[in-house]
Image (cartoon, rainbow, N blue to C red):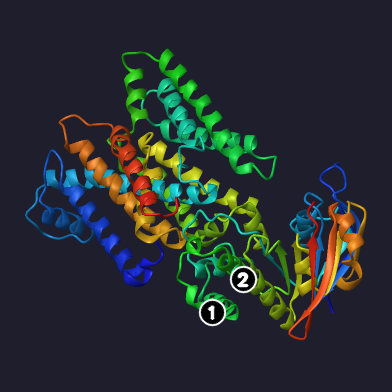
Amino acid sequence: MDVIDMENGGFRYNGGGWIFRSLSFTVGEGEILSILGPNGKGKTTLLKAIQGMLRLSEGSIARGGNVGYVPQIAAASFGYSVLDMVVMGRSRHLGLFTPPGKRDFAVAHRCLERLGLDSLADRPFRTLSGGERQMTLIARALASECRCLVLDEPASALDFGNQNAMLRTLRSLREDGMAVIMSTHMPHHAHVVSDRALLMFSSEEHVCGKCDEVLVDENLRRLYGADVRRISFSSGGRGYSAVVPLFS
Amino acid sequence: MTERRAVFPFSLLAGLLVALTGAVALFSLAVGRFPVPVERVAWILFSALIPAEGSWNVQETSVVLLIRLPRVLGSLIAGGGLAMAGAALQGVFRNPLVGPQIIGVSSGAGFGGALAILLFDGLFAVIPLAFVFGLLAMIAVWSLGSGDREESLLSLVLGGVVISAFFTALTSLGQYVADPYNKLPAIVMWLMGSFASSSWDRLVFAVPVICCSGTLLYLVRFRINVLSLGQEEAEALGIDVARNRWFVLVCTTLITAATVALAGIVGWVGLVVPHMARMLVGSDHRKLLPVSALLGATYLTLMDDVARSLTAAEIPIGILTALAGAPLFAFLLKKRRREGGAWM
């Protein structure tokens, strides 16, 4: 079943040029879509349109449930605890005058447990490592009881170990039936976790398809204007493939 | 700061602060040029509710009930209101330097009060005009600040600075043309802030406004947490950021305007007290708002005690709060940074 269904979507700020146009794709339950494109080609704008923070200028988008958003790790100037952060995910279910109650805290705890963060609940958010913060923000999105998770470059600021943990988390959420959309600068990540990839070459040129079919050298070269190779090898009887840039 | 939660339960802290506020209020009714023993103050208060016999005289009764009680109530409520407004604004603006004065409301209300003194005899017009000009200042700031989405907070602060400067200039103009023998001193004294003229009929207007707005702010305490994450994140969490911010701004404006109308410009309370509260309970506005209110009430009432008891003549309270507030503010921020804490 489709959770997100965009048809011929286009967006531009009042009278400006098109940020993206005639874009169609669907994301179903238990499916991961990666969005790739060079800097400034509208990935973040598209993510906002998917959440409904920006309204499409043309075309339509159907959402089969709430969308939870995981921003890039931001500097935290406030001293909230991890639990306080996660319970804020409940906002959309709370009235203007209603603070979160027992049930909301129970949901927050469950989401922390789901990601193995329960031991961090009382820690100040700002003392966490980058990886832990990112996980907390995912827990916050889950606390909103969303059916689709939108992540803005979830792994770009993380080291290899945390990248791996992040990608495994995304995979396990997919197993729960979550629809996941993430933007990424790393074709390699897209390859490892996602079912399909959306490549945004320019505002009106994009391809969307199975990773194996669209994440090919030629497309990636065109996408980034740099030489990129996909390499495949096997280790311990398992086949792997990686995408590496050829820096000149 | 939130680690302290487990060690020191919030309900105990809140109870202690309520008791402290009550004790300070009782003490403030007793202290002054004409001292009344605390136990007699308690009896006078008690007998005002339930007629009882006692060994106090009419003079003591009228000092406590007619002169000091409205004044203490005024400073409690103004202090609590200003501190709460400051805490809410710092959260919404995500900035530790923001206070009720920065949004230009104080200057607007200050000008309104000065204008009232200039145009009319007596103080009857001060409250309504201070209030109206406070609201006008807020609307002006808001219309300057609205428009661009991303930078709307910054442009709001800029709008506040501009409007503040404008109304300050108008106030100076008013002082320049005022009659130097009878109007000018009244304007200057009024602008420096004082609870000296607090009386029951002045409280009747300000207290309900501050209490209602304060209650509304308290009710949206969790929303202020969400707003403090910033526009984008708050929007992504599914709340209507613009409308929620408006709500908080209107409440803080009403509080500020009502306080200026009641007691002139009393600076620094709304800026300093939230930082003290944050050291006690952390950044969570669910705790920060009530604790700020209690601390602010205690702080301003003690300041007012000093203002009216230290010398034979009244010291304007605006001078005292600034004298105490500026070094205290510097100290609090430095201490927090040294301890590796967040600004907020």
Check disc 1: other Cα within 10 Å, few if <14, some if 14-19, many if 20+.
Answer: few
**Tag 2: residue type?**
Gly
| Farthest front residue in view | A248
Circle on res. A161? 2
Q: Nearer the viewer, residue B98 or B182?
A: B98
Label 1 sits on residue: A106
Q: Quadrant of residue B13?
A: bottom left
Asked whether, in this view, residue A184 is left or right of residue B10, the answer is: right
**Are circles 2 and 1 on residues that touch, CB within 8 Å?**
no
Q: Nearer the viewer, residue A134 or A233?
A: A233
Q: Nearer the viewer, residue A5 or A44?
A: A44
Asked whether, in this view, residue B189 is left or right of residue A231, the answer is: left
Residue drawn at 37 percent across, 68 percent down: B5
Tell me the SS state at disc 2.
helix
What x and y, as percent, mark residue A115?
60, 77
**Tag 1: residue type?**
Ala
- The image quadrant where one finds the N terminus of chain A is bottom right
